[in-house]
Amino acid sequence: MPRQIALFPLQIVVFPGEAVNLHIFEERYRKLIKDCEEDGITFGIPTYQNGSIKEFGTEVRLLNIEKVYPGGEMDVKMEALGIFRIKDFYPTLENKPYAGGLVNDYEIDHNEDPRLNEQILAYSKRLFAAMKIKRSLPENASNFTTYDIAHFVGFDPEQEYQFLTTFNAASRQQLIIEQISRILPIVKEMENLRDRAKMNGHFKNLIPPEI
């Protein structure tokens, strides 16, 4: 059954469960945040790519207004909820200055295989170490999902959107495994190149081969 919500199109992909930090400067979306604060409403962030609003997005709710600037701009912290599909988009929502639309909620398969997630977690730790990503990862897969790392495995924006619209848990796990398997050797080779570059100009104690 379609329902009406406010919409805030952005050039990002938001995954369920993600903590989202936004800097709000447009007057119409400052009004949206105020409505979230005062009336407890949520809003949707549909992805904007290649000059158009994509049909899928993620619903978010306000956690906190972190800072309000003298000019009225604000920093806000949001929590991402579920995924929706836009049925009808309205540039303005009834008597509000911000956009909105009719959306249908999409059921997400959260039943990711714990054994595969243990493997993904191990790969992720190796990848994060190689890329020097200072982001903590859980010790085990009991409270871990593929959404937790999808922003950090080298997906481009279109691949992130594809991941967002992959509702089957096993398919999401497969996408992550394939992506890490592709990117980890590249990252390791770049790390080796950096190490070799650092050696240039240094005196090297090299042992010649026996010929």
Image (cartoon, grey):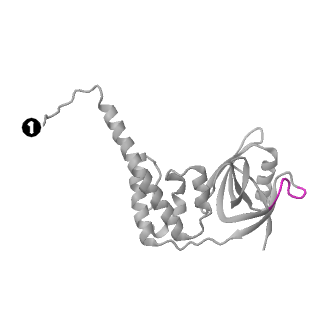
Q: Position of residue 16 (x, y in %)?
A: 61, 63
Q: Position of residue 134 (x, y in %)?
A: 46, 48
Residue at horizontal 84 percent and vertical 53 percent from the top: 91
**Which of 83/157 is in front?**
157
Residue 112 vs 70, above or below: the answer is below
Magenta span contains residue 89 = yes
Q: Position of residue 201 (x, y in %)?
A: 29, 25
Q: Would you identify the image quadrant in which residue 90 lies?
A: bottom right
**Which of 78/131 is in front?**
131
How packed mark 1 is, by other alpha carbons closer than 10 Å (few <14, some 14-19, many 20 or more), is: few
Residue at horizontal 9 percent and vertical 37 percent from the top: 210
Which amino acid lies under the numbered mark 1 shown in the image of this protein? Glu
Residue found farthest to the front: 211
Left or right of 167 in this view: 140: left
Residue found farthest to the left: 211
Identify the element where label 1 is drawn: loop
Quarter containing the C terminus: top left
Residue 117 vs 132, above or below: the answer is below
Residues shaded magenta: 88-95
- Residue 59 visible somewhere in the drawing: no
Residue at horizontal 69 percent and vertical 47 percent from the top: 50
Residue found farthest to the right: 95
**Which of 40/121 is in front?**
121
Secondary structure that dominates the magenta span? loop
Magenta span contains residue 8 = no
Left or right of 31 in this view: 107: left
Residue 121 vs 51, above or below: the answer is below
Disc 1 target residue: 210
Residue at horizontal 34 percent and vertical 32 percent from the top: 197
Q: Position of residue 64 (x, y in %)?
A: 68, 55
